[in-house]
Image (cartoon, rainbow, N blue to C red):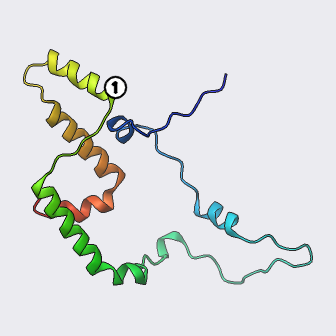
């Protein structure tokens, strides 16, 4: 039997807190797939330059990112204003809702909102650490 891969679409909280990391293309594989096929008559070129070790590679921001800082800051400010007016989000997840509602009925003082907020914050912080840092020091 073949198993059908389950889509994360419409799974809401379940999709955010799933334990399996997604497989990402390695940079080498991406480079190989973008290379043009060589003709049989062309010889491979060799380079005398040694590859730069990962530790020594520069982590420069692309020029477009540097130029877009003011635009990005405007966008961040706009998002902060929206969130300060309405910090709520909506999601649909039948399994998560069932678990949280069962906990609400069986544990005194259990809050679905507080638990969902904690779970989502942890998941978002783990999945998007760079974006999380943007808002870390902001007054939200």
Front-most of 35 and 49?
35
Compared across the picture, whether 75 is left or right of 88 comes to: right
The spot of residue 113 in percent (x, y) is: 15, 35
The spot of residue 94 in percent (x, y) is: 33, 27
Q: Is residue 24 above or below residue 112?
A: below
Q: Residue at x 22, y 18 (%)?
A: 102
Compared across the picture, whether 38 is left or right of 95 comes to: right
Using a 10 Å C-alpha cutoff, classify the residue at mark 1 as few (fewer than 14 neighbours), some (14 to 19) or many (20 or more): few
Front-most of 54 and 117?
117
Q: Residue at x 39, y 39 (%)?
A: 15
The spot of residue 33 in percent (x, y) is: 69, 63
Q: Name the residue beneath numbered marker 1.
A: 95
Question: Would you identify the image quadrant in which residue 99 lies?
Answer: top left
The quadrant of the rendering that contains the N terminus is top right
Q: Is residue 67 visible?
A: yes
Q: Secondary structure at mark 1?
A: helix
Q: Residue at x 16, y 59 (%)?
A: 82
Q: Is residue 12 above or below residue 69?
A: above
Question: Would you identify the image quadrant in which residue 76 lies?
Answer: bottom left
Q: Is residue 137 visible?
A: no
Residue lying furthest right: 41
The quadrant of the rendering that contains the C terminus is bottom left
Q: Residue at x 28, y 77 (%)?
A: 71
Residue lying furthest left: 109
Question: Would you identify the image quadrant in which residue 5 lies?
Answer: top right
Front-most of 43 and 52?
43
Q: Is residue 84 above or below residue 41?
A: above
Compared across the picture, whether 67 is left or right of 1 comes to: left
Residue lying furthest top: 106
The spot of residue 97 in percent (x, y) is: 27, 27
């Amino acid at each position: 039997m073949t198993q059908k891969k389950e889509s994360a679409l419409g799974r809401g909280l379940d999709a955010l807190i799933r334990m399996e990391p997604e497989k990402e293309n390695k940079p080498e594989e991406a480079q190989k797939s973008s290379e043009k096929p060589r003709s049989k008559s062309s010889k491979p070129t060799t380079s005398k330059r040694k590859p730069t070790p990962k530790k020594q590679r520069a982590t420069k921001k692309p020029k477009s990112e540097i130029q877009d800082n003011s635009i990005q800051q405007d966008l961040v400010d706009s998002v902060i204003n929206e969130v300060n007016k309405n910090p709520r989000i909506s999601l649909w997840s039948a399994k998560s809702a069932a678990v949280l509602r069962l906990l609400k009925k069986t544990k005194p003082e259990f809050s679905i909102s507080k638990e969902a907020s904690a779970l989502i914050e942890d998941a978002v912080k783990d999945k998007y650490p760079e974006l999380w840092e943007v808002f870390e020091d902001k007054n939200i």
